[in-house]
Amino acid sequence: MSRAAETVSPLELADYQKAVRLVLQHPLVTPGYPDKAALATVRRWAGQLRTDLMELLGYRLVTTADTARLQRAQDGLDATRPALARAGRPFDRRRYAYLVLTLAALGRHGAQVALGELADAVASDAVRIDGLGLDTARKADRDAFVDAVSWLTERGALTLADGSATAWAGDPERAEALYDIDREILTAVHHPTRVLQHLSSVTALLDSAGALGMSAGRAAQRRDQGRRARRLVLENPVAYYADADAELLGQLRAPALAEDLERLTGLTVERRAEGVALVDTSGRLSDIRFPGGGTVAQAALLLAARISAAVQRAGRHAPELLPAPTAAERLAARARRIDAALPSRGLITELAEPDAESVHEESVYEQSGDVGQEPGETRYPFVTDSWLRGRLKEITGEYGAGFAADLRGGPDRLLDQALDLLNAMSLIARVDGGALALPLLARYRGVTARVKTRTTAGPPSQTALFAHDTAKDPTP
């Protein structure tokens, strides 16, 4: 920990750590987001935060009169923190596109804008993008557009002055909404570290050290590896030693890592034989709670227990052991999916050609695709898709009365979402044909569940599923 952070008195340390957690959990803090007290808390400790977040994590905190914006250094492509629509579902590609086009359109307007006028401006840009478009006569398009506008409204970039966006989405001929535009917050929402049109691959966004102006010389390599190790533990449910290169492994094992992160966040660092986790049983920092409520989380928890039990089998019933995809392989696969959506013509193609470094990086990823046995290679128990479908069928048959009807009637969709959640929590690794059980999954061997009839008003047959984890809560 930096000398500056050591000057925080024990009496004030909890308030300082609260400010740290606030800005880590909400990279954009405004007068009303995430609540009215957050900005004052962050601003009180702004100088301390600016020093410590840069020194320990390589993150830059930019503050203005009405905003606090954390610019993270990105080491990987993370699909677990999506923007959320009004209904709580993750944004799809259409909503993300509308959000970006809305930001661009707002830059061309004055202090106020009508929702219908803004929609027309976005539509004129969207029509030039193959496969996108925005037709205000279509309810689905209006809903997606209002989700993007609502996301900006929640953060204060737009403030509803009159009317209703929901009413406009229902019938734009009869309803309208008027918004005030906050330029300061709008600028803080979209604060790229480089010119996006110049990128030839999404992996170029991961060179955050250069983007934030940090030195890349030899003298700074160890410091930057330390930052990367802290980020790995902070931003992920668990940092497995098997995924780390030799230099990063040394940093993960260093006692100073736990001291730094515990004092910074107020949480506990737990070390096991397989890796390191920052344990957040209170949910003060976690963006995903697991175990959690809802059909998907409950099904995932029960499925985790069955996978964990299967892993314990010995003899001819023991699951096959296979290597997990390396970090480089996972990054390359995600990058290929994202890069497939890049325009094949226009500014990106004209202004950016792959440089020697990016070509070399791609070749390394391709070479790492060989999953043959290597010396010291870590292998994990493998369960097949058919086995997983069978276990989910058992779970639904036993506990389905507590599941949401739409998911109970769509077992393949429920299984896919449950596996995605387990994958996001680093409990499994999804691979072709099934999933690999990772070490953290062992915490869920003792899960039990029961279906409890509710006594609240409504049909007497309403039920709810309650799952109990008899092991220690591992939520990082």
Image (cartoon, rainbow, N blue to C red):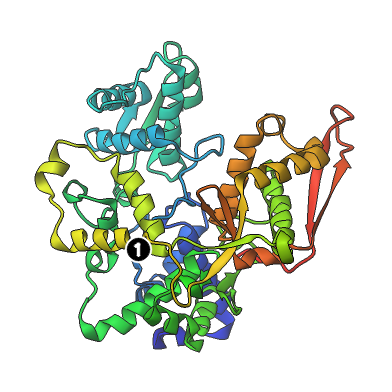
**Above or below for 281 versus 218:** above
Q: Position of residue 321 (x, y in %)?
A: 58, 63
User: Where is residue 424, by image quadrant?
Assistant: bottom right
Does residue 327 appear in the picture of this structure? yes
Identify the residue at the far left of this view.
Answer: 350
Q: How crowded is the residue under tag 1: few (<14 C-alpha within 10 Å), some, or many (20+)?
A: some
**Type of residue at label 1?**
Ser
- Residue shown at the point (10%, 46%) measured from the top left: 351
Q: Position of residue 266 (x, y in %)?
A: 57, 75
- Residue shown at the point (20%, 49%) measured from the top left: 200
Front position in the image: 134 or 336? 336
Q: Position of residue 315 (x, y in %)?
A: 73, 66
**Above or below for 200 versus 172:** below
User: Where is residue 288, by image quadrant?
Assistant: bottom right
Where's the C terminus, which quadrant?
Answer: bottom right
- Residue shown at the point (44%, 80%) measured from the top left: 249
